Image (cartoon, helix red, strand yellow):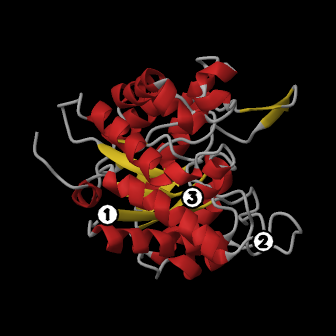
Amino acid sequence: MTEETFAQALERRILLFDGAMGTEIQKHQPKPEDFPDNKDGFNDGLSQTRPEWIKTIHRKYLEAGSDCIETNTFGSNKIKLDEYGFGDRTIELNQKNAELARSVCDEFSDKQRFVIGSMGPTGYLPSSNDADLGQISLDEIREAFELQAEGLILGSADALLIETSQDILEVKLAIEASHNAIEKTGKEITLIGNVTLDQYGKMLLGTNVQSAYTTISEMGIDIFGLNCSTGPIEMEPSIQWLNDQKHKPLLIIPNAGMPENEGGQAVYKMTPEKMAKAMDSFLSEYPQINVIGGCCGTNPEHIKALRKVIDSQKKD
């Protein structure tokens, strides 16, 4: 197997990310005692108390054909970890999560596999005037992401993925924080800036894709991406506009369709075959797309179907 960096692989071929983590965790039917200090719902903490669960999830996605797996750190910025009483261990827990993902990648010798450091939102909306969600200092948000990014880099992640972002100001702060962590650690790493758009092509606070792209595309990110909120069909107008810019490589990670409410639970019903058909069309029509994968509701079967799509295409 020839060693290559994530950046080199990105130049050579279309890369496949994994699918949902939370959906797969629920299949293990976790109980409060499974979580650190019985902190029910602390999914990221399961990497410490139930590492084999997380390894199994990573392994299934790699077996399905993923080139890249995301760390189980979606909620591991310091602000989110503070909610569970683990904020003072932000660097350590992110590092261990990245190392765990790396250990599973190292089980596969057929081709290079990559670890993507997942950095989800803080739960705050710093652009908002909301009495609760808007009342936090920008420095606190920036520090929360910087500590997380530092841990992921020290754990040998190949890229940092700022994902599922609803507030463009928070995205900017996360990018700034990531650059600070890169400078502090002295390690080069690919930086991916994602935003999450609704079915009308806007972020939660009204920022459209054009404004979001213009705001962050010159902040030193290597890839611009869309993930979560909708299925692939609803993303297409935004993808078309982004592709026309012919500027940054694009990452497209949709849900398995639009969520449907069943008994108070969000359910995603797009089959692997339907998702594969949509993504096959995207890869044919929009050559700026360099990375695809799945978000909420997707599982190893969806990833297996996307693997077949990529293998049937030739990247120019």
Q: Nearer the viewer, mark 1 or mark 2?
A: 1
Report how far apart the C-alphas of labels 3 and 2 lie in the structure.
15 Å
Check residue 189 in the rendering and tell me which mark sits there, or answer none: 1
First along the sequence among labels 3 and 1: 1
Please tell me which of labels 3 and 2 falls first in the chain. 2
Q: Secondary structure at mark 1?
A: loop
Where residue 304 appears, x then y in whole percent? 42, 29
Residue 32 on image: x %, y %:
68, 22
Label 3: element kind: strand
Q: Position of residue 70 (x, y in %)?
A: 44, 43
Instruction: Tell me the residue at 73%/42% (across/down).
Output: 258
Residue 215's x, y, as percent? 58, 81
Which residue is the site of mark 3? 226
Q: Residues within 10 Å of mark 3 (few under 14, many from 20)?
A: many
Residue denoted by label 2: 206
In the structure shown, which secondary structural element does the residue marked by tag 2 occupy? loop
Q: Which amino acid is tagged 1?
A: Ile
Residue sitting at x 64%, y 57%: 79
Marks 1 and 2 sit apart, C-alpha to C-alpha, by 31 Å
Proximity of marks 1 and 2: CB atoms separated by less than 8 Å: no
Is residue 37 among what the camera can see?
yes
Name above or below for residue 152 compared with residue 32.
below
Q: Amino acid at mark 3?
A: Leu
Q: Amino acid at mark 2?
A: Gly
Work out whether residue 20 can be spotted: no
